[in-house]
Image (spheres, helix red, strand yellow):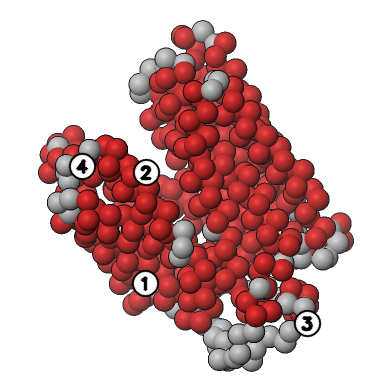
């Protein structure tokens, strides 16, 4: 783990860090077994998520029997309830360790999926949506701290990239299996995939509990002063990092929810094209993560993130230009644009989480990384509203997403000198970046 000796003092205005219990690092053989077990557990988790998460609304309408408007409202309320979790999750991570929180997240999500399984109306469907959203937020708030603890590599960019590749591949595999089951069994197949999803959450929790060992530095009880509680809010560079990350993340979320609407309603394109583009993106993310980390190893993390912003701008321009493309060339044009979007996503995701993990002070890492998840949850909530702007004009959503990415590029350039040098620089080029 990267130390934060002088950074912590600056973040908390000179407040001394609380005494911490000593941690004995695991032996290399134990660490390797824990790492491989973690990869398997996360693969199992995302396979189950691929089975059900894309079908939540379909399940609520077809299996439970709710009207689409009611089902959409119920799932949205559940998702919004999940936004209340990160502040609590961060403290749990700092006190109990990320492994315990990820295990808890699996159990909460299993409970949510089980509620869906037995739902026969609005009440149980809402309970399932809330539990699933809360468990998902718990999971993401602790996930990257857990990866950092279990992995013996420094910096953490490559481990993060490898986990992203495995999770993307398993999610796609789960979605394919779900499609096959639904094609064979119809509505009964929906209940089958939900039941299997619940089992995968329990299996992941069991693997983490039995096979993963994650060293954790526990804080001794101490007086939690108001000044310490405001530590993250006083850390303006970290808050700015959350902001620029959210601006970049909007492009990814807009792709997922906006591309089908754009192709089918604005371009009158073929119905099969959005699925092909999503599958292509999944494949690229599943195979290109570690190669991208290696290719950008000599660049500052902020430079890599800014490059992703530039590619997102290019993607928006190419996608908007599709209105002028002849129908016969439209699929090829948009597939090419998807490759640009995939390249931007490869540059963005791993580096964003790595810079946040490195910039967080060690004794408050859980709270920092939990707060950082708002950089992804807020764009996810905003993206559908941006898609709705297609009713104003075909160009409006693309201009907004491109502007957000461009602002992120400028923000990263201004932010780089204010972040800790070890968070900005991946390897031995620290002389070019001033420490905060």
Q: Which residue is mark 4?
A: 66
- Cα distance between the residues tagged 3 and 2: 47 Å
User: Quadrant of the image for the C terminus?
Assistant: bottom right
Residue drawn at point x = 68 percent, y = 34 percent? 403
Counting residues from the N terminus, which is met first, the one under dot 1 or under dot 2?
A: 1
Q: CA distance from mark 4 to mark 1?
A: 30 Å
- Secondary element under disc 4, as helix, strand or loop, is loop
Mark 3 or mark 4: whose residue is earlier in sequence = 3
Q: Is residue 110 visible?
A: yes
Q: In the picture provided, is 303 more to the left or to the right than 330?
A: right
Q: Which circle marks residue 104 in the picture?
A: 1
Q: Is residue 131 left or right of residue 192?
A: right
Q: Nearer the viewer, mark 1 or mark 3?
A: 3
Residue at (79%, 48%) from the top-left corner?
Answer: 413
Q: Position of residue 63 (x, y in %)?
A: 16, 44
Residue 84 image position (x, y, % from top left): 46, 63
Q: Earlier in the sequence, mark 4 or mark 1?
A: 4
**Figure check: 210 above or below 262:** below
Sequence-first disc among 3 and 2: 3
Q: Which residue is mark 2?
A: 172
Percent x, y of residue 164: 49, 53
Dot in front, 4 or 1: 4
Q: If you read the primary sequence from the N terminus, does the residue marked by circle 1 or circle 3 appear first?
A: 3
Say which mark, if any, is on residue 14. Answer: 3
Query: Is the C-beta separation of discs 4 and 2 under 8 Å?
Result: no
Query: How far apart in space, not on screen, are marks 3 and 4 (Cα)?
Result: 55 Å
Q: How many angstroms separate mark 1 from mark 2 (CA)?
A: 25 Å
Indicate the secondary structure of the residue bearing disc 2: helix
Q: Tell me the crowding category of disc 1: few under 14, some 14 to 19, or many 20 or more residues within 10 angstroms, Cα based.
A: some
Q: Residues within 10 Å of mark 4 (few under 14, many from 20)?
A: many
Tell us which disc is closer to us: 3 or 4: 4
Q: Quadrant of residue 186?
A: top left
């Amino acid at each position: 783990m990267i130390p934060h000796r002088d950074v912590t003092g600056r973040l908390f205005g000179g407040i001394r860090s609380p005494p911490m219990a000593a941690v004995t690092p695991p032996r290399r053989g134990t660490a390797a077994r824990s790492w491989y077990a973690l990869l398997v557990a996360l693969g199992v988790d995302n396979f189950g998520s691929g089975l059900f998460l894309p079908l939540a609304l379909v399940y609520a309408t077809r299996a439970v029997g709710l009207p689409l408007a009611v089902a959409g409202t119920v799932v949205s309320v559940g998702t919004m309830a999940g936004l209340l979790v990160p502040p609590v999750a961060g403290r749990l991570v700092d006190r109990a360790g990320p492994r315990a929180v990820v295990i808890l997240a699996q159990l909460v999500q299993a409970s949510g999926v089980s509620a869906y399984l037995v739902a026969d109306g609005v009440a149980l469907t809402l309970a399932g949506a809330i539990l699933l959203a809360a468990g998902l937020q718990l999971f993401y708030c602790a996930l990257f701290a857990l990866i950092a603890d279990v992995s013996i590599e420094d910096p953490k960019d490559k481990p993060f990239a490898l986990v992203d590749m495995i999770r993307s591949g398993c999610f796609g595999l789960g979605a394919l299996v779900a499609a096959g089951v639904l094609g064979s069994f119809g509505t009964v197949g929906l209940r089958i995939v939900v039941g299997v999803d619940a089992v995968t959450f329990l299996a992941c929790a069991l693997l983490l509990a039995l096979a993963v060992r994650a060293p954790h530095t526990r804080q001794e009880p101490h007086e939690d002063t108001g000044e310490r509680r405001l530590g993250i809010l006083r850390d303006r560079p970290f808050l700015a990092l959350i902001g620029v990350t959210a601006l970049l993340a909007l492009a990814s979320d807009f792709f997922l929810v906006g591309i089908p609407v754009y192709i089918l309603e604005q371009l009158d394109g073929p119905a099969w094209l959005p699925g092909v583009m999503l599958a292509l993106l999944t494949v690229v993310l599943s195979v290109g993560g570690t190669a991208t980390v290696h290719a950008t190893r000599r660049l500052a993390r902020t430079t890599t993130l800014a490059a992703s912003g530039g590619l997102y701008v290019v993607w928006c321009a190419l996608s908007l230009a599709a209105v002028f493309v002849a129908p016969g060339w439209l699929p090829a044009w948009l597939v090419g644009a998807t490759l640009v979007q995939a390249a931007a996503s490869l540059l963005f995701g791993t580096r964003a989480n790595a810079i946040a993990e490195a910039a967080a002070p060690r004794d408050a890492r859980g709270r920092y990384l939990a707060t950082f998840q708002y950089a992804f949850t807020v764009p996810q909530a905003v993206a559908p509203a941006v898609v709705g702007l297609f009713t104003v004009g075909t160009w409006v959503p693309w201009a907004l997403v491109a502007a957000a990415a461009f602002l992120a590029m400028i923000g990263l350039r201004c932010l780089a000198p204010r972040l800790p040098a070890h968070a900005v620089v991946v390897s031995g080029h620290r002389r070019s970046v001033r420490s905060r």
